Structure formats: C-alpha cells, structure tokens
Amino acid sequence: MDGDGDLAGMPTQTSVTATRPLPAGDIADRIEGTALPPRRPTGDPGRWRAALVVSTGILVALTSFAAGMLAERDLLGTGSTSADSDAFGRVAEVGRLLEDEYYFRPDDPAERDAFRQRLVDDALSGMTQGLHEQDPYTDYLPPVEAGPAAAQLAGQYEGIGVTIQPVAGQLTVIAPFPGGPAERAGIRAGDILEAADGRPLADLGDGEAAQYVSGPAGTTVRLTVRRPGVAEPFEILVTRETIVQQQVVYGWLPDWRMAHIRITVFGDQTTPQLDAALDRAAADGAVGIVLDLRGNGGGWVTAAQETIGRFVPADRGPALFERSDATTGEQRPEPILAGPTAAHDTPLVVLVNAGTASAAEIVAGALRDYDRAMLVGEETFGKGSVQRVHTFDDGASARITIAEWLTPSGQHIPESGLTVDHRLAQPPDPEAGPDPQLSAASRVLSTGGWSEVTPRW
C-alpha cells in the first residue's frame, strides 16, 4: 500500500538485524482548522464554508492489523480546496452546529477541545466506513489506532501478537505471531474475535478494533472467540507483551541440507534481515531454500519488490503490475528491485497458507510466474488491492485504496486466493508433531521440483 508509502494490502498485525527508517514528515494536511471553521460573531448573517486543503507534494511509498504494501515514490499533485463543494461545506457546518447547539456539549475548555476532536475523527471515519461493503481496506485511523499499525511495520509494538482482518463483518485472525502471547494462549488462524473485555468487535474496522485488543505490555484482555467447527463461542485470556517481531527467521533442515527462511511481515527490517539470512544459507552450503510466507499478512510493497529481486534478476520483467484506473484497465509495471549481489539461483520453494496476504501474495505470485518456485501448502488469503497511506502530523492516517495489482503474467488475485501447486492442509494442532507442509516443501526441492528463471507465460 502507499502510505508513508503504499501498502499492498496488509491486514492489521500484531535472525539477523538491520534497520531502514521510513521517510519522515507529513504526507497530507487535514481539513483546515481541524475540519471546523473558526466561530463567527453572534448574529453574523453570512454563510461560511470550510476549505479542505490538500498538500501539493505527496510522498508515497508502497505496504497486513492488520492491518499491508509499500513502494516508495513521489507523487506531485496540484493544490485544491473544497470551498466550492456544498457537500463538504455541510460536513463542517454540521460540526459547527453541534459545537454551538448540542445540548450535551461540554463547557470546560479542555473537554470542549476533546469533543471537537472526537467530532472530527468520527466524521472522517464515517466517510471511509461507508465504503467498507465494497472495499474494507480504505480507512481513516485516528492516532490511537494508527500508532500500533506503524509500530508493527517498524518491528516492535505492544499487544497480543496477531494479524487480524475484517471478513464479512467479522474480525478474523489471519495468523497469530509465532511464539507470541496470542498463540501461546491458544488463538489460532481462522478464529473470529467477537468481543474484547465484553466490547463487541463485529462491524469494526481492523484499526478501530485494534485499540480494544492491543494495549500496554503487562495488561490483559479477555477475548470472546468463535472457532469454525466449535458449536459455542468461548473466552481466552491473553496477557499483552512487547512484541519484538523478528521479520526474518533463519532455520536449518539438516536432514535435507536446506535453509528454512521465514518472513513474518514485509516491514522496515525485512530486506537487510533477508540478505543476512541468504548469506548464512550460502555459508551453510544449503542445496535448497524453503521460503516460508505462511501467516505473513503483507507490508510494504518496496520490501516485496526487493524480496523478489533476491531470487529473480531485475531485467527479467516487472515484479507486479498496478492497475490504477478501473475504467480503462490501464496497467503500470512496477520493477523488480535488485540486491547488492546477483540474484540467488539456489533451488527454491514457497510455503503459503490462508494467512499469506497482500505483499506476501505479490512475492509468491511473482516467484511462481517466473518459474522460480512452486507454491506448497494451502490457498492464500486473496487481497489484490493497494492502499496509499497518508500520515498526518498528529499520527493519524488515511489509507486509500488506489489500485489493484496483478502478477507479472497479468493474473488478478481472486478473493479465493492464489492456488498452490502442491496442496497439503496444516493439521489442527501444528505444535503436536513435525510440520507436514515443511516436509512436503523439502521433498519438492529434493526431487527437483524447480526450474531455471524463464517466464511461464
């Protein structure tokens, strides 16, 4: 998606280290005067309008909590106002009327400021929530909700450690963070979070729901969970922690002499950590790599393009196509971003499941399109849209769906997700024994289930 860049659909989420900071600065301005015009003298008969100010320079970058893709680039637009719009003028006018006439408006100056801010946040949230039936990913997040999402991509945040996404109005767990408090408490992918401490979560956006689920480390939240196949909902108590998210985790499969590289999110530290993991695989003499994207809810598009560039030469073609005009269907190629060394040619297979979403689907789809890897596991989540994230000076953000993306062969990502080449369901309790999907992926590599980098279309 675009946000402080663009997000490739990432739902809200909850080795080897290095850091790459995000671009600093504000991305767009809010409605001037905090969306409410200054008071006019009593008795002033004149009508007024509010101006909606849009910044002339918008820094864009392409990013799952929840909830997704970033590819950094600059967009230059012309300044504009909403002074000519009766519709936006009415929004500001109703805000003024509530400030002046609402019976329950506070009198204390501090409380009045908070009341005004709540009117602004509710109005902006309402604009985007009205679009959720068609597009659940366009959203406005006030600072209390936007902060955790940004912290997740930075690699550290406080909460329970889950990636969640509204599905048909129900807050669904895409994946718990491996080893995190939610997973240890028994939360599973596919669980529906019905309430947090008795507060219903249905029909809330992932950002709004996050403020009830996340919280300071050491505090607890009692989640009401509905699990497919279980007749009645039940409660799980989770103690929140500081989640230090290792964005790339390296493992060694001695029986196969293969590297197991798991990418948990496409965030700020993914690319340098992946480079370090690939260097270690080479040093260990790996004859194959299992790239594990299970439970990866997405992230910055830039990180996805760079990940593809570690395995496919940049001159082979695009990392993805972006379709930004639904009327004309015009498509724009986004490049593969090469690393500091030549693309690795070690045999590769990609593990995916229903928690593989957005930017992770971009990577999986591209690696398969270039015949660089087969997909093993289960069908992916199915999120094929890109959001541009505009960050305001108080930490709030607006996430606007700006495009659909397609794989290098022009394949649209259906809601049913990417199909796999070798399907194998994960057992209900993956901790009970060996990982059959990982074993299957290793078998695919050992039997030569890969090919050189040549496009398949």
Image (cartoon, rainbow, N blue to C red):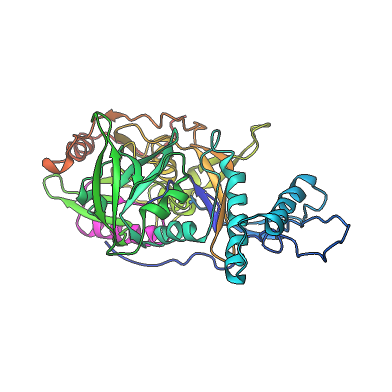
Question: Is residue 285 in the magenta section?
Answer: yes
Instruction: Please name the residue shown 40% across and 67% down the image.
Output: 19
Q: Nearer the viewer, residue 316 or 130?
A: 130
Is the residue 299 above or below the residue 358 in the image? Answer: below
The image shows residue 136 at horizontal and vertical percentages of 51, 39
Which quadrant holds residue 187? top left
Q: Is residue 75 left or right of residue 303?
A: right
Q: Residue furthest bottom?
A: 109
Instruction: Please name the residue shown 39% across and 61% down the image.
Output: 269
Q: Is residue 322 left or right of residue 284?
A: right
- The image shows a total of numbered marks equal to 0
The image shows residue 397 at horizontal and vertical percentages of 55, 56
Q: Nearer the viewer, residue 363 or 455?
A: 363
Which quadrant holds residue 61? bottom right
Q: Is residue 358 left or right of residue 247?
A: right
Q: Nearer the viewer, residue 26 or 224?
A: 224
Q: Is residue 379 left or right of residue 336?
A: left
Q: What's drawn in magenta, residue-wise?
A: 263-288
Is the residue 410 above or below the residue 393 in the image? Answer: above
Question: Is residue 314 in the magenta section?
Answer: no
Which quadrant holds residue 138? top right
The image shows residue 132 at horizontal and vertical percentages of 54, 38
Instruction: Please name the residue shown 28% across and 50% down the image.
Output: 222
The image shows residue 105 at horizontal and vertical percentages of 62, 59
